Image: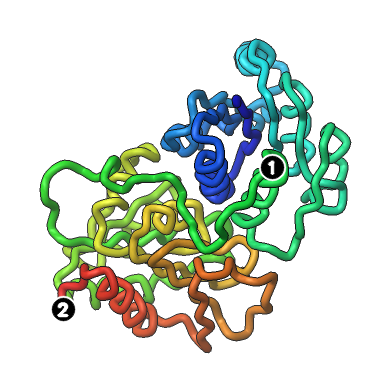
Amino acid sequence: MKVLVVKTSSMGDLVHTLPALVDASKYYPEIRFDWVSEQAFVEIPSWHPAVDKVIPIHLRGWKRHPFCRQTRQEISRSLGQLSDLHYDQVIDAQGLVKSAIVTLLSSGTRNGMTWSSCREGLASLAYQRKFEIAKGRHAIERARDLFAAVLGYRYDSACLDYGLVRETFAVPGRQPAYLVFLHGTSAEKKLWQETEWVRLADKAERHGYRVLLPWGNHSEQARAQRIASASENIQVLPAMNLKDMAGILAAASGVVGLDSGLSHLAAALGLPVVTLYTATSPGLTGACGSNQVCLSRLDLPNQGEPAAGHMLLKKLKTLDSGSVWSILEDQMAGVGLCNR
């Protein structure tokens, strides 16, 4: 069976869809997938062993420059790949108008959610088969529910497997023990105070860990440099692609992150991760993993139920460095990685 998955963005959304491919592969060992993804995230589906081809699109760039020659060439190339292949099933796992348009352009039975289940109800008009998927469930569970309904199987909700093998990303050679602080996120309101990052790095140094700071844009680079100026034990990483970043994460002793795609990736790799939700509720889209803890403030409203058995959610009066370090230390000790 050949299936096309339409899930174009964002990074966390793509990571959330990987377990559904694992479920399908357990039921249909010979199943193979192609995947339509935004150019910036094509590496993520390519890491899954059941994915043969990733078809890149660049909707964000195309909207900015709709009439330029390069845009026309890129659209022609991407749409050509969609029309050249026939699929047994096409699954729009995103439920947006933009993903529905891509689904319409593909060749195969088009599947998606009903009007009331889609994030944008209008998208449902593109599907030949429509499935009611409960909105109050975590995004990972919604994706797993949709794939199971389309392909006709039941999955084991107690098992969460992203299909990623940490060892395939690890940087060669033994590295000194280090932690990764994922201080960047998509919105200003989701940030954590720089002073708290500095205090957390100080605790890491006193326990024998170096601290690595990645960045993805000039603003994040400047923040990383400000945090690093507090101690020689903090290193600002160079610019790197997603695979190299996954390698850095895979070899880390632990990770502290914000509501961002890289935090979801760290959780998917099974690392000891503490993810801070300073302004958003993790109930519907929070990071899930075997060693993942989501921290949010007590005053933030609950939105949906955390994924059963795969997300430990703790609510604190304040998200301070002392509390974060204590929880991270417990996570690392639980997998035998703590340097105490």
Q: Position of residue 290 (x, y in %)?
A: 41, 64
Mark 1 or 2, nearer chain start = 1
Q: Which residue is under mark 2?
A: 340
Q: Residue at x 29, y 51 (%)?
A: 250
Q: Which residue is under mark 1?
A: 152
Q: In the shown orientation, is residue 55 left or right of residue 80? A: left
Gap in angstroms between the C-alphas marked 1 and 2? 49 Å
Q: Vertical placement of 79 versus 178: above or below?
A: above
Label 2 element class: loop
Q: Quadrant of the C terminus?
A: bottom left
Q: Residue at x 31, y 48 (%)?
A: 166
Coloring scheme used: rainbow
Q: Vertical placement of 166 versus 40: above or below?
A: below
User: Which quadrant of the view contains residue 178?
Assistant: bottom left
Please tell me how crowded label 2 is: few (under 14), some (14-19), or many (20+) other residues with Cα within 10 Å.
Answer: few
Q: Position of residue 255 (x, y in %)?
A: 34, 63
Q: Vertical placement of 177 versus 118: above or below?
A: below
Which of the two residues, 31 or 71, is positioned nearer the viewer here? 31
Please tell me how crowded label 1 is: few (under 14), some (14-19), or many (20+) other residues with Cα within 10 Å.
Answer: few
Q: Vertical placement of 171 versus 175: above or below?
A: above
Label 1 element class: loop
Which of the two residues, 271 or 259, is positioned nearer the viewer here? 271
Q: In the shown orientation, is residue 183 left or right of residue 26? A: left
Amino acid carrying mark 2 in the image? Arg
Closer to us: mark 1 or mark 2?
1
